[in-house]
Image (spheres, rainbow, N blue to C red):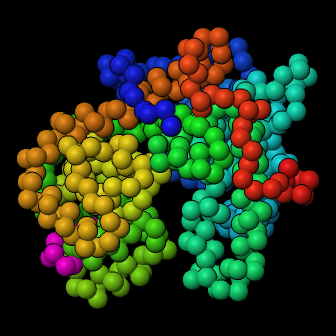
Amino acid sequence: MPVPFELPEIAQELPCDAPLELTALAGKRVALVHDWLTGMRGGEKVLEVLCTLLPDAPLWTLLHNRGSVCAAIETRPIHTSLLQHMPGAARRYRSYLPFFPLFAECNKAKDADVVISTSHAVAKSMVRRTRTAGGSQPLHICYIHTPMRYVWDLFDEYFGPARMGAFASRFVFAPIAAALRRYDQRTSARVDVFVANSTYVAERVRRIYGREALVLPPPVDVARYGSTVREAGDRYLVVSAMVPYKRVDHAIRACATLGRKLTIVGKGPENQRLRALAAELGADVVFAGFASDAELADYYRQARALLFPGVEDFGIVPVEAIACGCPVIALAEGGILDSMTNETAEFFHEPTVAALEQAMLAFEARALSAFHPETLRARARCFSEAAFIVRLAEIVQAAVNPPALPLEIPSGLQSRRDTTELLDPPVEAAWLR
């Protein structure tokens, strides 16, 4: 079983901006690896914390759109792959997905005693397996957001018949995805310690890679919401990219049926379709588009509740909401089961519009007084940057200094040389090995 996330007691007493350090890495050459740098999303927030803790660590990545990430990431040596020089890669880098293994194999982190990767695609693969001049292999700690989602759980979303056509999906993209799945499994052996961002992802790591993972939720900037005064209004809120798997359409349909008001913050390829749906249903929906941090805090503060009908690997948005004292109505699936409790959220158990409607009615029956803002904020502080660093420091200390480990070593700290046999046969092409 994955090691459950338990907030270290000291972290409960620390401010979110506590000057914490990874002391176990002092004097060691550390390299960072990240899939690509094209914007500041959840994965880049984790990388930002690592870069702040390790200001001298060089960074390896497939692609870097300069100026797209924060200063802590930008102001360090960044080593990019061949993808950086491919036509149109800055905007359409995912089009080169079949070649990601090639780009990764040609751009591995080097000259390091410890490699820390943050991966949802091929970053975990960008580590040399050969011994260094000193005779040792680098220790590789992988903070994994998910195994490569494009070819596992969300293949149909990206390459299914509805998106690519039946012929192309079956005879072009399915074989490519099969090769990428084998590569993804095979290169899991390059990782010494898997650290998953949720129990949900840890279970996926076990199922796909045959490996155990420690569980460490990502850092959430709850400090910026600390002074928010709750002023609940009558509008429900969705904060989400407009893509199919987020199920924003479920929120629109539920609010239309119940006659409730809804505000949607976010952009994405589904924008026009969702606007048309809201107009067709006559729903009272405000499409707010992009929101700054300050504007987002106001939306959370004034919302009746946050609607969260999709399944996320972790889900930072619900934690931000409760940091503002805003309760959540959520599908009881995915990483949200690590972050929310019955005191912070009203859950529903089927991914249907009808189930969401029933949950909204149940939430309204409980009344807002059942969700005390201070209780919600206290739960949010469990996922602060300070809590993340304290737990990460424990993991790094145990991985770097094995003699300091307790007698019962967490299974997530097993050596890559002890990994289970992969489920699929190896890919024959040499560059995929």
- Determine the image quadrant of residue 333: bottom left
Q: Is residue 200 left or right of residue 359?
A: right
The residue lying toward the viewer, choosing from 181 and 287, is 181
- Return the x and y of residue 385 as percentages of the image width and height: 43, 31
**Left or right: 295, with 45 as reference point:** left
428 versus 124 height, above or below: below
Between 143 and 362, the one lying in front of the other is 362
Q: Position of residue 357 (x, y in %)?
A: 21, 70
Q: Which percent across, then down, holds residue 65?
A: 66, 54
Q: Residue furthest bottom?
A: 280
Above or below for 60 versus 98? above
**Residue for point 63% across, 28% down:** 413
Whole-percent x and y of residue 354? 25, 73
Does the magenta portion include 38? no
From the viewer's perspective, is 340 left or right of 28?
Answer: left
Q: Residue at x 64, y 86 (%)?
A: 165
Is 433 situated above or below 159? above
**127 and 402: which one is in front?**
402
Marker count (numbered): 0
Q: Quadrant of residue 396?
A: top right
Residue range (magenta): 256-263
Q: Residue at x 83, y 54 (%)?
A: 426
- Residue depicted at x 47% and y 43%: 198
The answer to whether residue 230 is seen in the rendering is yes
